[in-house]
Image: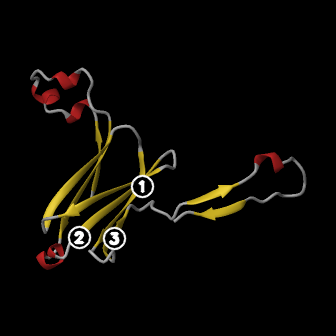
Amino acid sequence: MQQEWVDRNFLASSHVGTPDPRQDCPPQGQRLLIAWRFPKFLVDQGLKLNLTVRFWDNSEELLTRDIENSKSYAAFDFHDQRILTYRIEVVDCHHEVVETWEHHFWTKQVLVDADRSKFSVSSHPMQGSVIEMP
């Protein structure tokens, strides 16, 4: 697992000085690189990689990719948003988790639902409810 920034310096033309139309509007964002090695018998049973990415605005995106080779990698580009944390699950054809890898800041997402109209400056504390997200 590797997380990297993608910008003008990511383009080979930035280092060797060759013409490149992408220099006019270079990529900007982040990329996740995921490499794996699984026994062939597991891959033959049908493995799927599920990547859940949580962004700084607290939105999430789930990306799924079939694992067709026992040793390979995949690159996921996120040019529009900044990555906060992520989780990878590899599941078999029965949807059972074979392997999990979590970024060290990964947590179960918890949203606090608080009605701001009920808050006031007083000596009595007001409490909001906590909703656990799946």
Check the image and report above or below for 44 versus 110. below
Locate residue 127, reporting x and y percent.
78, 60
Secondary structure under tag 1 reads strand
**Which callout, 3 or 1, points at the residue further toward the start of the chain?**
1
Q: Earlier in the sequence, mark 1 or mark 2?
A: 2
Instruction: Give the spatial CA distance, label 3 vs label 2.
Output: 13 Å
Residue that appears at 76% across and 51% down = 115
Residue at (42% x, 55% y) in the render: 85
Per the model, the C-alpha gap separating discs 1 and 2 is 23 Å
Foreground mark, 1 or 2? Answer: 2
Mark 3–mark 1 CB contact (< 8 Å): no
Specify few, some or many for label 3: CA neighbours under 10 Å numbering under 14, 14-19, or 20 or more. few
Residue 57 in the image: above or below residue 52: above
| Placement of 92 over or under 75, stated as above or below | below
Please indicate whether residue 101 sits to the left or right of residue 54 in the image. Answer: left
Q: Are marks 3 and 2 in contact (CB under 8 Å)?
A: no
Q: Is 41 left or right of 89, judged from the image as shown?
A: left
Q: Residue flagged by tag 3: what amino acid is it?
A: Thr
Q: CA distance from mark 3 to mark 1?
A: 14 Å
Q: Nearer the viewer, residue 125 or 118?
A: 118
Say if 8 sits above or below 121 in the image: above
What amino acid type should be assigned to the residue bearing mark 2? Leu
* Picture mark count: 3
Identify residue for label 1.
85
**Horizontally, is 99 left or right of 18 in the view?**
right
- Give the SS element for disc 2: strand
Mark number displayed over residue 106: none
Q: Which residue is mark 3?
A: 100
N-term mark: 3 or 2: 2
Q: Which residue is denoted by mark 2 in the rendering?
A: 47
Q: Amino acid at mark 1?
A: Thr
Report the residue that reaches farthest toward the right: 123
